[in-house]
Image (cartoon, grey):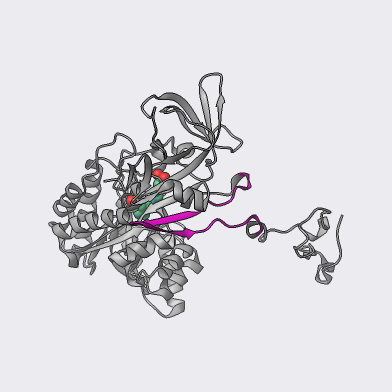
Amino acid sequence: MTPFTYRDGGLHAEDVPLSRIADQVGTPVYVYSQSAIEAAYDRFAGALEAELGAARTLVCYAMKANSNVGVLAALAARGAGADIVSEGELLRALAAGVPADKIVYPGVGKTRHEIAAALKAGIHQFNAESLPELELIDAVARALGVRAPVALRINPDVDAKTHHKISTGRAEDKFGIDADALPEVVERLRALDAVDLKGLAVHIGSQITEQAPFRQAYTRTAELYRWLQDAGWPVDRIDLGGGLGIVYRDEPAPDVEGYARLVRETVAETTDARLAFEPGRHLVGNAGVLVTRTLYLKQGRVRPILVVDAAMNDLIRPALYEAWHELKPVARGAGADELTQMDVVGPVCESADTFARARPLPAMRAGDLLAFFSAGAYGAVMASGYNSRLPVPEVMVQGERFAIVRRRPSFQEVLSSEQVPGWLGRPADAAPDRAPPDTPVAGDPAASAGTRKTG
Ligand code: LLP
């Protein structure tokens, strides 16, 4: 059930009018419902625990979907672990109170530094995606005098039947270790003393709305797990990844209980493994909206064009995946049912900055607020500073209260990490409060003096 409903003619997040948040925090602004996040987590974890037992179930929220510390803290308080993909995510998870021993770490490009940081933190496991990565994990663990718990992420060559850019389990995708190469890889593991092989991992893609791909991938993973045990490896866990979809438009409603049953049938009944899960979108996607204000209604040649103050840099999913996000006006007045088709666009200077084409909407005027739905996952986290637009603030609502969980920085803060190279001199109109640009010129023998400027 959505936490965003109309009351007294205005769209609310739980019990807070979105117009109040927009007025106080400014637009665009992301708004998350804590209760909706908790409800999604409780349903997902509850369904799995009912089928598999609590002792066998570990839910590690895939924080790439939304890594705001407020969101993480709410989930950590519910008992969630985290799926991280970088040192930055490790630090955020720990800062938000996720216990290190509930953290799993997939990703094809872990650096030496990141591996060391995760080992020092004492994470639950690395989901290793290649032999060279395993060799590096071994070397780093050895240097630190520790052992590295590892699950091998296999690529089962299964088509998740989702958008091609977010499919990860086909043979041609960059993820995981080719399932057929597993015997060879584990043979090589015998020489890697600091690596502790704990089990297998699999993740075939995101926004999956059918059960068949999960069934295929999980059945294959369970087979490989039993093969490892038969070969004498003391494995005891399988990480089944994330991917369960949400409703953006007219997709079938995700069947969480059906998914949990499928896991029991394919993996829990056929192996003795403890099972981890990495849901991201499913827990937060429909718990967030992006609120934007209309700047202009212009008459395009083909149809009216509504220009709003959010842009592709704030919510990139429509531009990147042709994603459809429901759009609703925040104020619902008379004439709410008289719809006109319009294009909805942002201010960024390219045509990809189009959120919707020919979308039926009620009459809108400059200053009116609109909400993009299903923006809680892969929204704020994928934002960029394109066109020198400021990062969007994020707000969390609980009942009648709300808190800014990420404030909008000032232009000065954003600019403070940049500087003009010393050899360009000080622009006449540079901000007066910034240090003189006397950066040493790299490779210049006179650079140590820090004064010489080259032409
Ligand atoms: N585990 C692994 C190893 C992953 O790569 C991902 C997502 C997840 C779990 C979580 O998947 P979820 O439960 O959220 O579907 N930016 C795209 C989605 C990219 C997903 C990347 N990996 C979008 O906006 O649709």
Nearer to me, 143 or 216: 216
451 inside magenta stretch: no
Where is residue 296, by image quadrant?
Answer: top right
Would residue 105 be visible to someone looking at this image? no
Q: Is residue 334 left or right of residue 302?
A: left
Near-viewer residue (234 or 269): 269
Identify which residue is drawn at 43% across, 41% down: 371
User: How many numbered discs sit on the rendered protein?
Assistant: 0
Q: Is residue 301 left or right of residue 279?
A: right
At horizontal 33% and vertical 59% (from top left) the residue drawn is 61
Q: Where is residue 232 in the image (x, y as percent from the top left)?
A: 21, 67
On the rendered image, what quadrant is the C terminus found in? bottom right
Which residue in the rendered view is the most extreme toward the top? 301
Residue at point 29% right, 34% down?
Answer: 250
Q: In this view, does 220 lie to the left or right of 409?
A: left
**Would residue 216 appear left or right of 369 to someone viewing this image?**
left
Read off the magenta span: 387-412
Q: Position of residue 334 (x, y in %)?
A: 39, 30
Going by the picture, which residue comes out furthest to the bottom? 145
Up the image or down, 324 lies above or below 113; here it is: above
- Is 98 above or below relative to 407? below
Residue 33: x %, y % from top left = 35, 53
* Residue 326: image location, x then y, percent: 38, 37
**Residue 405 in magenta stretch:** yes
Q: Which quadrant of the structure image shows residue 307? A: top right
Q: Which of 426 and 101 is in front in this view?
A: 426
- Asked if one can make out residue 373 in the rendered structure from this viewpoint, the answer is yes
In which image quadrant can residue 338 be found? top left
